[in-house]
Image: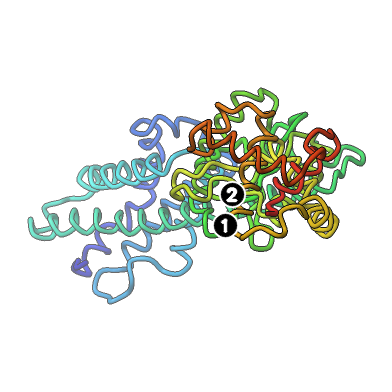
Amino acid sequence: MYLPTEISDVLRPVVGDVVEAIIEGIPIDVPVYAMPMEGRFGQGVRQGVQVALHRFLDLPGTHLPALSEDGKWVYEGLGRGEVRSGRSLESLLAAYRSGARVTFRTISRLVDVSQLTPEVLMALGESLFAYIDELSAASAQGYAQEQSERAGEQQRLRGELVEMILRGDATDGAVARAAAAIGWTLPEVVVVGVVPFPHVDGLRSVLGPDALVAERGTDVVIIYPFGNRAARRTSLERALRGRRAIVGPARHWQHAGESLHLADAAGVHHVTPGTDLPADADPPVWVEEHLAQLIVHAEPTAVADLAVRRLAPLDGLRPVVRERLAETLLSWLRHQGQRAPIAQELFVHQQTVGYRVAQLREQFGEALDDPEARFELELVLRAGHR
């Protein structure tokens, strides 16, 4: 930015008038600032205008940067103030542009422009707007930094709230106050979900502000309101599809830790149906639909011992025959002996089903008519024992 040194001598006597003209003009050009220029807001605007003009007049004939460190701090602070006031950055940038126009008009009115050549006037205009670009860049940086810091602080507070809820910490309204502090409505009923880290990209965005999301070890934990069960399930299932998520049963928020415990248990015991689907089509696992599997897996040694005893009649068969009959037995137990659904499930003819069931009766005998034996057989077969 080049300006001859004499421009400072010509303009410095009218700086005070230019400052007042800008202060008066900004509320007219940018209505969002149509407020009394007093208090912290007015002080900030006046300081910003004064620092800008004096720095601008110090630059001609030097190699100084457009903004000093102190000046940069001032304009970053103005950008931060816009975030705190809930305004967009565009309002501040519009005020800068307004200030540049007012400055040029006021100079033209107060200064004998015959003292300045057309080239100097043109350089003055160009330099003025180039300087405004520097101010705008500093404020944009401050605006972005404030947003980032606020987002980080918000996430920290939300993470602390997640921990409080999972602990069931209801003492003297601590959770309610923490929720209110971040503008989150504490729901009566929640579900807790777990998503492994390779699948968490964009998770907060798709879940929206209703969800609390926090990192925990190699997973991300989600606390999600679940009052309107059907609608909430649809929304959550859509957001978690393809993320290998596990969602615990619905609980009152004070017992959210139970929902997390069951979700963790489902992960430990690999209760993950749908793993044969493409990753982007894989739905979340809803633990409430797989509670029997969790119960079975809770005591794997006991289930293994039971399998040894109940499946002993198949021990003498070739592995391929044993597997085929075990598969048929599970389907027979599941469908209560109805041949049509068994045949459909196994992709065989109903006569084949009859032949295999006859083999099973030959091997197991009266056990297939014993309700307790049938229950134990289905239990060990569902647990994956063959």
- Quadrant containing the C terminus is bottom right
Q: Can you see residue 115?
A: no
**Looking at the image, is 138 positioned above or below residue 377?**
below
**Looking at the image, is 152 positioned above or below residue 359?**
below
- The residue drawn where x is 70% and y is 60% is 316
Q: Amino acid at mark 2?
A: Arg
Q: Can you see residue 238?
A: yes
Q: Nearer the viewer, residue 360 or 260?
A: 360
Q: Quadrant of residue 269?
A: bottom right
Q: Which residue is mark 1?
A: 320
Label 1 crowding class (10 Å Cα cut-off): few <14, some 14-19, many 20+?
few
- The residue drawn where x is 65% and y is 30% is 335
Q: Which residue is mark 2?
A: 324
Residue 287 locus on image (x, y percent): 70, 41
- The residue drawn where x is 56% and y is 44% is 84
Label 2 crowding class (10 Å Cα cut-off): few <14, some 14-19, many 20+?
few
Q: Tell me whether circle 2 and circle 1 mark residues in contact (CB < 8 Å).
A: yes
